[in-house]
Image (tube, rainbow, N blue to C red):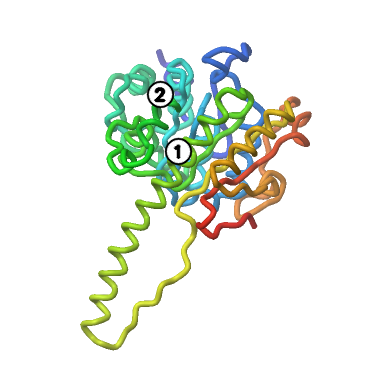
Amino acid sequence: QQQQQQQRQPCPYGAVSVQACHNMLAGSTGCAEWEAGLALSEALINHPELVRGATCLELGCGTGLVGIHAARAGAAWVAMTDGDSEAAQNCAWNCRINGVRLSDVPLGTNVQDAAVKELNNGQGLNCTSNSELGHGATCTVGVCCWSTEVALLSGAKRQMPSDSSALKLMGGRFPEVILGSDLIYDPEVVPVLVQLIKNLLLGAQAARSGKTENDQRGQKQTSGLGNCHEFVSMPQKPAAVAYLCSTRRNPKTTALFEACVIRAGLSLEDASHSLTSVGAGPASARFQCVSSLEAARQRILLQAITLPDDGWQAS
């Protein structure tokens, strides 16, 4: 028992340990670790400004590696979702062994309970990740079906998304940052993925527009009291952005994805510089001794997707 407790101690900051499977098809591919997920995790550590203070939703979280690094990079909220319950349960396990404790929010699924209650000795779920490791994000894990989410977050339903599993995991709010790695390998799911991203971006924009109007109304009323201040509209960052990291395998699939993004009326920017350049994080943080990642680096692409009128540009 003492040996088991020692094995369950959180990994030191700067190191990460995940339970993965050599069978690439396990958990509908979600229990294996893919090169694009490793590369995106490196980008988040080297460029924490991509997620710092933001509410984040990861699609196709797999082992949870990207979500764990988003929490370590300073995200305020990280919801990790996968379409496969086995992968989601493994993700929850990996969060715990890396010191990322999961928030007890209404999930509509027992994925977190099954993996985490055992690790917490039956004491239930903890509210935030371990602050001793330098990350205080609220983190959640659950199952999310893209086609179901598209239907729930379309049109007028976007204003009442109470049945959305993704938004339940987000505490009822739309994400400011959407993360995904190696999601576009299957041509059949590409149109659904793009539509889901668009619906989430539109929801985030609508949510911010409502908040901005209320803030402006309050500031105008305040300025009117003293009759000596005028409200000035300041430029804002985009309501939301999606970062998708992919390994180029089939040119036709990549072309299909880009065509779907354009057809959906979204903006697509190449942000691959974040995979190699050093930002505000540690100098050139990299995974060591991962031969598959080194072999694939030249084929890995990071793209940023936004609404066209959000004024965002990859820098």
Residue tagged 1? 57
Q: Earlier in the sequence, mark 2 or mark 1?
A: 1
Q: Residue at x 59, y 46 (%)?
A: 304
Residue 215 in the image, given as x and y percentages of width and height: 30, 65
Left or right of 177 in this view: 247: right
Can residue 289 be seen in the rendering of this structure? no
Q: Residue at x 78, y 36 (%)?
A: 298
The dot on residue 214 is none
SS class, disc 2: strand
Residue 274 in the image, given as x and y percentages of width and height: 66, 48
Q: Residue at x 60, y 51 (%)?
A: 281
Q: Residue at x 48, y 25 (%)?
A: 94
Residue tagged 2? 143
Q: Quadrant of the N terminus?
A: top left
Residue type at numbered disc 2: Val
Report the front residue among 216 and 257: 257
Between the C-alphas of marks 2 and 1, the distance is: 12 Å
Residue 20 in the image, given as x and y percentages of width and height: 57, 18
Are circles 2 and 1 on residues that touch, CB within 8 Å?
no
Q: Residue furthest front?
A: 263
SS class, disc 1: strand
